[in-house]
Image (spheres, rainbow, N blue to C red):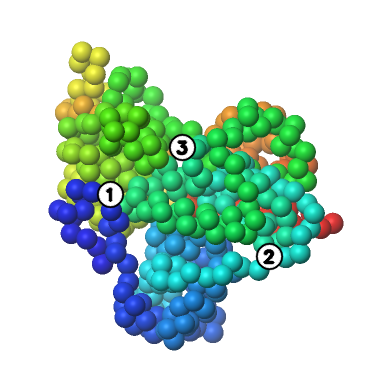
Amino acid sequence: MDREADARIMDFDEVDTGFTKEEAVAEAQRCIQCKKPHCIDGCPVGINIPGFIKAIAEEKFAEALEIIKKDNMLPAVCGRVCPQETQCQGVCILGKKGKPISIGHLERFAADSETTKVPEVAKASGKKVAVVGSGPAGLSAAAELARLGHKVTVFESLHKAGGVLMYGIPSFRLPKDIVEDEIAQLEKLGVEIKTNYVVGRSVPVDELLSYDAVFLGTGAGLPFFMGIEGESLPGVYSANEFLTRVNLMGANKFPQNDTPVKFGKKVVVIGGGNVAMDAARVAKRMGAEVTLMYRRGESDMPARLDEVRHAKEEGIKFMTQTNPVKILGENSAVSGVEAVKMCLGTKGDDGRCSFSVEEGSNFVVEADVVIEAIGQGPNPLLISMLPELKRNKNGSIAVNCLGETSMNKVYAGGDVATGAATVILAMGTAKDAARGIDKKLRK
C-alpha cells in the first residue's frame, strides 16, 4: 500500500507501507509450492523462497525469517529494493496466466515482523579476512565469512557503514534505521566494522595484504558525465554527489546540518535508471519543479516500473526521446539546458531501441540545477594502488566464478567487479567470493 503522493512529497518517510499480517498470509497462501521452483533459480543469492512463503502461510513468521537468513542476512533491505519483478517474481509460474506471488513484499514482511536469534557460527578457523567496503557486497561477504568461522574486519571510508544503502538510496525507499538494524545483526556474528578508514591511506596496502584473504567490495562510486559544455557551472551535480549530500549528510536540512546543497526551483535530471528516479524524487521533496530527460523511450528505461510510477505520481515531468547537448549559464550559474529530440530506430540484441538526433530540433528547458545520472564506474583509488590487478575494459576488476582476482588471496565482488548493477546481484557475487575464500583458507 502506497501513501498518497500529495502527502509523501512533503517528507522523506517510506512510500510503501508494506503488507499487513492478513495481507501477507493471504498472499502466501496463493503459492502453489512448485516441485521445481524457478523462483529459487531467479534469486541471485538462492533463498529457499517456497520454504519461507509456506512458513508465512502457516503464520510461522519467525521460522520464515530464519529460512531467509540462511541465505540472505539483509532481508529487510532486499525486500524493499530488489528488482523482484525481473528475478524471482519474473519466473513465478503464476505470472504466466495471472499475478505472480509478491515475493519481495513477503520477504519484507517477514523481516519487519520478526526478530531472530543470531544464526549459528562455525568453529573459529583462526583465519583473518579483510573486507574493503561496507555496501551490499562487502556486508554479504562479511556475513558469509563470519558464519563460516573466520574473523572478519570491514574497512569503510565513510563515517557510516552501508555504502550505497546509506548514501545512494533515499529514506523514502529504504529507511536508514532498517539498514542500521541489519548491520547490527552482522556485528552480532562477530564482524568488526571500522568506519573512516580509507584503505591505501589510513590503512596501508601492506597492512591490508597481511590478512589471510582480502575481499574488495568498493562498488562503483565514480560518476560518469556527458562531456557537454557547461558541466563545470555551479549547480551541476552528479547524482552520486547530490544523493550523498542529502541521504548521508542531511543537506536538505541546511543550515541545521553542515553540508550544503543548492535548492533548485527548476531541476533537470538526466537519465532513466533507478538513480535518476531517486535524484528526481529527492529534488521534488526539496521543493523543486523537476523534469527528467531520457534519450530513449519510456519502455527502454532501466528503472524499475514501480519507481517510474512513483515518480510520475509525485509530479515528475518525463521528457523522453530527449538528449541534452549543452548546459546554459548566466552570471556563473545554471540557467537552462539546451536539448535535442531523438528519433528511435530498431531494437538491438539488448531489447532497447537505437536512436539518432532529429536535426534542427534544438530547444531550451529552463533550469537552475542539473543532476546527471547516466551511470558510474568502479572507484579507482584502491585499484590504482594494486597495479597487479587485472582489469576489464570498463575498468572493473577481472574475477573468475569464485571472485578470485589476478592477485594471490585477493578477491572481489559487487559493482567493482561487474560494473554498476543491482544490490542483490552484488550480494550474489559476494557470496560466491566468500565461498571461494573459505575453500582457499581451508586448504
| Label 1, residues with CA under 10 Å away: few <14, some 14-19, many ≥20 | some
Residue 212's label in the rendered image is none
Q: Position of residue 188 (x, y in %)?
A: 59, 59
Inspect the image, locate mark 1, and give the three-letter code of the amino acid beneath it: Phe
Query: Does the image show residue 18?
Result: yes
Q: Quadrant of the N terminus?
A: bottom left
Q: How many marks?
A: 3
Q: Earlier in the sequence, mark 3 or mark 2?
A: 2
Q: Is residue 205 left or right of residue 107?
A: right
> At x 24% / y 63%, what residue is drawn?
2
Q: CA distance from mark 3 to mark 2?
A: 36 Å
| Residue wearing tag 2 | 121
The label on residue 376 is 3
Q: Is residue 192 left or right of residue 304?
A: right
Instruction: Kindly identify which residue carries mark 1.
Output: 12
Image coords of residue 217 (percent x, y): 59, 44
Please report contact status of discs 1 and 3: CB closer than 8 Å, yes or no.
no
CA–CA distance in space, label 1 to label 3 = 25 Å
Please tell me how crowded label 2 is: few (under 14), some (14-19), or many (20+) other residues with Cα within 10 Å: some
The residue furthest top is 331
- Residue 321 seen in this snapshot: no
**Marks 1, 3: nearer the viewer:** 1
Depth order, front residue of 342/338:
338
> Who's the residue at 35% across and 30% down the image?
259
Above or below: residue 209 compared with residue 364: below
Callout 2: SS? loop
At 75% from the left and 37% from the top, the residue drawn is 209
User: Which kind of residue does numbered mark 3 sit on?
Assistant: Gln
Secondary structure type for disc 3? strand
Quarter of the image where one finds residue 29: bottom left
Tell me which label, 1 or 3, sits earlier in the chain. Answer: 1
Q: Residue 141 appears at what percent x and percent y?
A: 62, 53
